[in-house]
Amino acid sequence: MSSMRIAVAGATGTVGRHVVEVARERGHEVVGLTRSAGVDLTTGEGLAARLEGVDVIVDVSSTRAQSRKGAEAFFGSVTRTLTAAERVAGIGHHVALSIIGIDRVPSGYYRGKQLQERLLAEGDQPWSVLRAAQFHEFAEQALGFVRVGPVSLVPVMRSQPVAAREVAESLVDLAASGPAGRVADLAGPEEHRVDRMARELCRARGLRRSVVPLRLPGAAGRAMRDGSLTAAGDPTAVVGRTTFAEWLAAGGRAG
């Protein structure tokens, strides 16, 4: 495989740091598109200077916005900004990370991801999209959704968590192999309930937190509980290697 110059949007995030690590291990040069590097992904400020000589952009950027308005504003702006800059710089491939089940769960954040996918599919830039399940790290993130003193209210949600390192490996594979459209979904080897994952994480790390399962109301809550965010029933899905227990045993660093 020949060496490439890969720009990573969201290079310091949960999966972005793994993308950087994997790409460098494989001999690629990495350019981080981050605020610390002077880049604003929503406006394009500082972007052009970072794209000189870049062969492909891998977008794993994210936002804390959970409302439809906020999520669509972020993912819409970032996708439009990146693809416009790609056209100017002559970059011939845009790789984006998305999420399994976003078209089955009526969530504001997922509406933003749907817009991201739609802009790529309807645009004129060559693209690839990988939908992945939640990462193992999601268990820790869930502890912070609703906190009341030492208690965390964690949504009752079925997931098929996958190692962020394995997601990064797949993204770098896509970057090197060329535009492929939407590829097979990627999920972990086992299905879990997120509140139980959070409880296991607390025990493994000695966290003095009580986890209380929270059944979210409405269509979104039902979809989270019925397996819509897993690869269940999809014979084309790719299944990862690392289990949640293995990831915990390795201190949350298992690849």
Image (cartoon, rainbow, N blue to C red):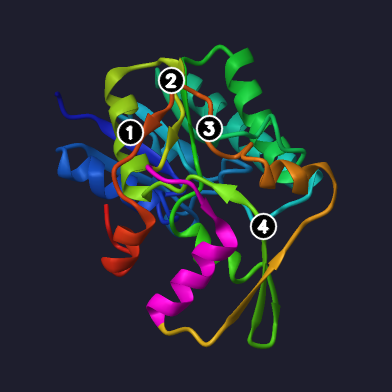
The secondary structure type at the circle numbered 1 is helix
**Is residue 164 at all visible to an observer of this figure?**
yes
Location of mark 3 (residue): 232
- On whether residue 204 falls in the magenta region, the answer is yes
* Residue 61 image point, x, y percent: 52, 45
In three-dimensional space, the C-alpha distance between marks 4 and 1, rounded to whole angstroms, equals: 28 Å
Pointer 2 or 4: first along the chain: 4
Question: Which residue corresponds to mark 2?
Answer: 236
Q: Does the CB distance between marks 4 and 1 fall below 8 Å?
A: no
Residue bearing the label numbered 1:
170
Label 1: how many residues lie within 10 Å, few (<14), some (14-19) or many (20+)? some
- Element class at badge 2: loop
Q: Amino acid at mark 2?
A: Thr
- Whichever of callouts 3 and 4 sits on the residue coming sooner in the sequence is 4
Mark 4 neighbour class, 10 Å CA radius: few under 14, some 14 to 19, many 20 or more: some
Q: Are marks 2 and 3 in contact (CB under 8 Å)?
A: no
Prevailing SS of the magenta stretch: helix
Q: Is residue 183 above or below residue 215?
A: above
Dot 3: what SS? loop
Image quarter (top left, top right, bottom left or bottom right) of the N terminus: top left
Q: Earlier in the sequence, mark 4 or mark 1?
A: 4
Answer yes or no: do the residues labelled 3 and 4 have beta carbons within 8 Å?
no
Secondary structure type for disc 4: loop
Can residue 62 be seen at all in this image of the molecule?
A: no
Q: CA distance from mark 3 to mark 4?
A: 17 Å
Magenta residues? Answer: 189-205
Numbered label attached to residue 123 = none
Indicate the position of residue 197 as horizontal and vertical percent values: 50, 63
N-terminal of the two: label 3 or label 1? 1
Nearer the viewer's eye, disc 2 or disc 1?
2
